[in-house]
Amino acid sequence: MMMIIIAEFFVVLLKVLWAFVTAGAKWVVRPKEKSVAGQVCVITGAGSGLGRLFAKEFARRRATLVLWDINNQSNEETAEMVRQIYSELDDPVTRDGPVGGVEEVPAFQPQVYTYVCDVGKRENVYSTAEKVRREVGEVDILINNAGVVSGHHLLECPDELIERTMVVNCHAHFWTTKAFLPKMLELNHGHIVTVASSLGLFSTAGVEDYCASKFGAIGFHESLSHEIKASEKDGVNMTLVCPYLVDTGMFKGCRIRKEIEAFLPPLKPEFCVKQAMRAILTDQPMVCTPRIVYMVNFMKSILPFEAIVCMYRFLGADKCMYPFLAQRKEAMNNNEAKNGI
């Protein structure tokens, strides 16, 4: 029995080493991107920001888009952009089959569907998902992108806003996944993408609810990834997206130390989404943008807490959210003053 365990241990070591080799090889030889042409892709929070950019990128790759957003007007604006992209595409295409290989797709027909959905409401998610299955078909790709931020210090934040942040940024992932994953598992074909944040890997002061929601989303994603692996459904993939601060206006005013900011500026949304798309289309399990996020996350795991605090203070990351919080507070006070006149 002991010999068997020792033998298995050495096999595991070899597999671990091989995983390092294959991961390193992907840095040298870029993997081929898979086709998503004709596949049904649901994107939550598609009305603006990263969600809109994801929609445009998938449209360029001929996917059928299903756009969810709480704001109907902005969602329709995204749909119009998608239709414009579709109108420029007319060549025949092929797509990946459900069980491997490639199958032909008939002449491309522009398809984009919009749904008003508040992902913070469980029943709204389930009913909208049922409409999608009825009107569009089974979903191949799920992009859990919708997110909110309260913009308050913990002791000043109303409980309702804390709950809203947790529900939209974390709990909604449970509901959308429960709605679409069963068919993916049945067909052994699908892809679930969690758009999280570097603030789900390491935190900062002043955004406790946001950090907690992103930590939760990452925990959910990792546990589900292990469950899918355990079920041996190798046709269902998952990708975790953890970008640094993205210049979408969500955290407008956030600033690290000005001398450092020149070397670590907010990410352009287009760059962030292009990096994420490359990861999704090559079935990469996780992508952090920029790459320094990997190093920061590793250092957080091995350094004493006081050492991390020293680094935060040097970078100006300890209070980087304070200007953003101050701006949000001032904006709220101004709105209250206007409403009171």
Image (cartoon, helix red, strand yellow):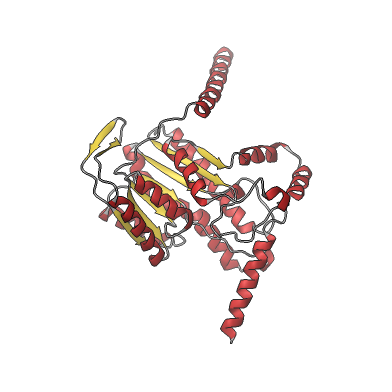
Left or right of 253: which side holds 47?
Answer: left
* Residue name at image x 60 percent, y 67 percent: 159
Nearer the observer, 213 or 81:
81
Residue 172's spot in the image, x, y percent?
47, 55
Name of the residue lying farthest toward the left: 106
Camera sees residue 157: no
Left or right placement of residue 180 versus residue 305 in this view: left
Q: Nearer the viewer, residue 323 or 120?
A: 323
Q: Would residue 275 be seen by someone viewing this image from the given angle? A: yes
Where is residue 256 drawn, in percent x and y?
A: 69, 53
Residue 274 in picture, x, y percent from top left:
47, 44
Outermost residue, bottom side: 341
Image side of residue 204 versus residue 137, left or right: right
The image quarter containing residue 34 is top left
Name the spot of residue 187 as percent of width and height, x first. 31, 38
Residue 44 in which image quadrant: bottom left
> Vertical placement of 58 versus 77: above or below?
above
- The residue located at (59%, 85%) in the rendering is 340
Q: Residue furthest top?
A: 3
| Total numbered labels | 0
Of the 4 image quadrants, the one containing the N terminus is top right
* Quarter occupied by the C terminus: bottom right
Would residue 201 be found to the left or right of residue 127 on screen? right
